[in-house]
Image (cartoon, helix red, strand yellow):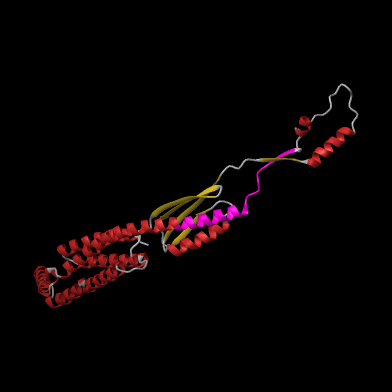
């Protein structure tokens, strides 16, 4: 199955007195690069998330972010009885002038350190449930992500099949071109030898030998055979149920190399036009392959 390396998915849910949300985005890359961001205290979630993503994806840079929202919890207050008792004892030991009113409870409670405000300690069980639920949510997000990558992969497959069929057609067109037939090659060589012999009074035997050498160098039999072989290999990979992006990329490079050699060797305008069109189709094929997992 052909899968794209690009995709996006999100998942969110509530757990106890809080909420969580995942966002996952993947883009093209040579290998698998997992980049995770989780809140403090979710180290165990990060480790499990890396395992899950690594088991589902083969290639691509994956950006995954977990965001946790905890519902506001009212602060609680408590009276520091020890500090209050020490303060009362200190006041009793003082000789207060009659003009000064005795200390009241309101005044004592206003002294710093007597009344303390604090947030309740987090519930370990609730935190564990939040971690468990967020991991399950990641699984749902990965399901959506892989489904999106598969949908894009099906669209890419249609494009790749169209491109590889065009490459196969052009290869066959070059194979059966009249300019490559033995009779046409022989006539062109004979004409070239006769022209040079008459114009420059050169030795026809020597010219014949040189022409044969040039003809051998200009033969594109091997390039056409390798192009046809690579086309068949691509067809096999496109029908595979494995991740084939790297192998397709290698074959695209080999197709391009053979097309370049073909263009460099041929000395006929019609064959050169076929070679240039081949290079265009192969480059378009290679651009699409960059998106394949």
Can residue 68 be seen?
no
Residue 159: x, y in percent? 26, 59
Tell me where residue 3 appears, x and y as whole percent: 35, 61
The mark tally for this picture is 0
Point out residue 19 in the picture as x, y percentages from the top left corner.
52, 48
Locate residue 288 relative to residue 266 in the image: left or right: right
Q: Where, quadrant-wise, is the C terminus in this rendering?
A: bottom left
Please state which of residues 121 and 55 is positioned toward the viewer in this rendering.
121
Residue found at x 30% / y 60%: 154
Is residue 137 within the magenta segment?
A: yes
Compared to 14, does 93 lie above or below?
Answer: above
Is residue 105 visible to the viewer in this orientation of the structure? Answer: yes
Quarter occupied by residue 197: bottom left
Residue 251 pos. (x, y %):
31, 67
Residue at image position (48%, 62%) is 52
Q: Is residue 17 left or right of residue 32?
A: right
Name the quarter where the N terminus is drawn. bottom left
Q: Is residue 105 above or below residue 149?
A: above
Q: Residue furthest top?
A: 99
| Identity of the residue drawn at 33% across and 63% down | 2
User: Taken as a whole, is the magenta stretch helix, strand or loop?
Assistant: helix
Name the foreground residue: 266 vs 170. 170
Front position in the image: 81 or 131: 81
Vertical arrangement, residue 264 with respect to residue 73, above or below: below
The residue shown at (56%, 44%) is 71
Q: Which of 7 and 273 is in front in this view?
A: 7
* Residue 208 inside the magenta-drawn segment: no
Q: Quadrant of residue 290?
A: bottom left
Residue 37 horizontal side relative to residue 161, left or right: right
Bounds of the magenta span?
A: 115-139
């Amino acid at each position: 199955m052909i899968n794209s390396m690009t995709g996006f998915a999100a998942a969110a849910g509530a757990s106890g007195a809080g909420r969580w949300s995942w966002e996952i985005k993947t883009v093209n890359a040579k290998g698998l690069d997992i980049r995770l961001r989780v809140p403090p205290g979710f180290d165990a979630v990060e480790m499990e998330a890396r395992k899950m993503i690594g088991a589902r994806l083969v290639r691509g840079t994956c950006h995954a972010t977990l965001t946790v929202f905890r519902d506001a919890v009212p602060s609680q207050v408590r009276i520091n009885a020890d500090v209050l008792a020490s303060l009362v004892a200190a006041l009793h030991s003082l000789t207060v002038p009659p003009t000064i009113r005795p200390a009241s409870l309101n005044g004592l409670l206003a002294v710093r350190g007597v009344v303390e405000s604090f947030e309740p300690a987090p519930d370990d069980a609730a935190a564990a449930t939040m971690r468990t639920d967020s991991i399950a949510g990641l699984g749902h997000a990965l399901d959506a992500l892989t489904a999106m990558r598969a949908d894009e992969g099906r669209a890419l497959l249609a494009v790749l099949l169209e491109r590889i069929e065009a490459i196969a057609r052009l290869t066959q067109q070059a194979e059966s071109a009249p300019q490559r037939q033995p009779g046409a090659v022989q006539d062109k060589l004979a004409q070239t030898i006769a022209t040079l012999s008459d114009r420059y009074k050169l030795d026809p035997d020597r010219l014949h030998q040189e022409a044969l050498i040039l003809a051998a160098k200009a033969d594109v039999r091997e390039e056409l055979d390798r192009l046809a072989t690579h086309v068949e290999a691509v067809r096999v990979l496109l029908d595979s149920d494995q991740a084939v992006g790297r192998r397709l990329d290698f074959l695209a490079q080999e197709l391009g190399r053979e097309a370049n050699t073909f263009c460099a060797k041929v000395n006929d305008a019609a064959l050169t036009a076929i070679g240039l069109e081949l290079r265009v189709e192969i480059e378009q094929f290679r651009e699409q392959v960059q998106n394949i997992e």
